Image (spheres, rainbow, N blue to C red):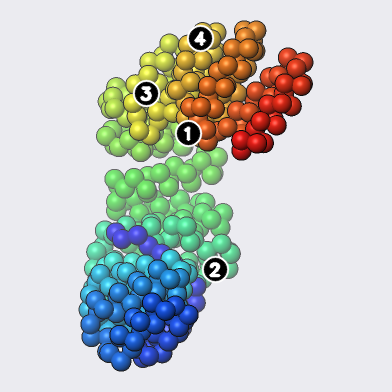
Amino acid sequence: MRQLYRRKHFSGKTIRRYSTTILLLGSMSSYASAQTIHEMYADRSFENALQQSMVAEFSLAYDDIATALHNYTVLAIRSNSTTIKQRALDVALEYNDLQAALDIATHWVEQEPTDVPALFYLSHIALKTHEYELAATTLDKILNIDPTADLEEILAGIAPEQPQDRDILLNALRASKEKNNPSILALIAGLEAQNGLYEQALNNINRALRKRTKSTSFILMKANLLIALQDDEATKDWFAKASRRNKDNLDIRLAEARYYIQINEQKEALSKLESIIKDHPDAQEALFIAGLTSIDLKQYEKAEQYLVDLRTSAKYQNEAYYYLAINAQRKQHYETAKAYYRLVDGSLYITSRRNMIAIFDKQGQLNDALRFLTQERVNYPQHASFLYQAQADILKKMNNKKAALALLDEAIKNL
């Protein structure tokens, strides 16, 4: 599904049309090069979509957003090109012209009533603009074309914040022709949960699950509703059943492990994670969580076993090095800990170096820490401010305030 966007007010299906002259005179006059383009195309029609697209893109390059939006809106209305409509919507939504976005999406659906991506756009924008009847009608059309369509992303991030708005949307969905479709039932359940109606929501997600037993999102929604109802035994039973029936579904099995961590049953969580790793040895998230859980359980050798496998991971490399260092530090293997901390970069850089300084201090090696931090300023100039201050703090701790001030003066000059 194409990425979805949103808009603010819906003014019906009337789509504004603009003449070439009005559109191009809007705000390009302050740019000499823009004027040249205007003189070339002002008296031409919109028949040449490529030329007009170039005008719109040229306007965007010069921050003439109004002209670009107007041109693309008209292009989208006049053209049969899906690519142009897509680009027009992208521009309208990027610059938060929600009226233009709605006009384009509405026209797209009128022109191509069975185009599912267009319907997805329209329903999403209608929800954002609180046009819930339009949204429900559009969702009906989507499900009439594809009864198995996944509607979650339509509502993602734009669920109504106010209870009264949720009630309006709920009423619209409950009255829709496709109200018994599993996807609609799931949307209803999600909105009911937001309103605190957990029992009602559970009933609706159970209805959805009877029709779509393997849906990961439905299974996890039911688990979350049981958690919200604070029914630990029912939650455990449901996770056990779902994991057994969906042994190859990592999302469900990881959710079960995270749940046991959430309720402070780390031993059971680690058992679940070990079972996942046995079936899926390359499951990086399982390895990472298993490593951290093993540290919490003081099973340091096991933690190292899991985390070492992530040293070449594009996603978890820095975290793996950091927690390998933590693991070594807990074992009082300080040189190993420092070696791992040296390899940490990214968002954990500063925390890792602070931990290293603490180890140097514990070992009575503050002079070594100063030399290390000096080299770090060469290796990581982007962290120079932090490194200078860390060195100054060490010098203060060594009762060498004069050197600390001199170092800070150097930092001010250099930075």
- Which residue is denoted by mark 4 in the rendering? 335
CA distance separating discs 2 and 4:
59 Å
SS at badge 2: helix
Q: Nearer the viewer, residue 243 or 114?
A: 114
Q: Which mark is residue 145?
A: none
The residue carrying mark 2 is: 165
Looking at the picture, tell me which residue is in the foreground, 172 or 320: 320
Residue under the image location 55 percent in, 33 percent down:
383
Q: Earlier in the sequence, mark 2 or mark 3?
A: 2
> In the image, what residue occupies the spot 45% across and 50% down?
202
Number of the front mark, 1 or 2: 1
Question: Label 1 vs label 2: CA separation?
Answer: 42 Å
In the rendered structure, which amino acid carries the disc numbered 3? Arg
Quadrant where the N terminus is found in the figure: bottom left
What amino acid is labelled 1 in the image? Gly
Residue indicated by mark 1: 346
Which amino acid, by three-letter code, is at mark 2? Answer: Asp
Of marks 2 and 3, the one in the foreground = 3
| Spatial separation of the CA atoms under disc 1 and disc 3 | 14 Å
Where 93 sits versus 409, above or below?
Answer: below
Which circle's residue, 1 or 2, is located before the other in the chain?
A: 2
**Corner quadrant of residue 399:** top right
Toward the viewer: 157 or 68?
A: 68
Looking at the image, can residue 16 be seen? no
Looking at the rendered structure, the secondary structure element under dot 1 is helix
Q: Which dot marks residue 311?
A: 3
Measure the alpha-carbon separation of dots 3 and 4: 18 Å
Structural crowding at the residue carrying mark 1, measured as other residues with C-alpha within 10 Å and reported as few (<14), some (14–19) or many (≥20): few
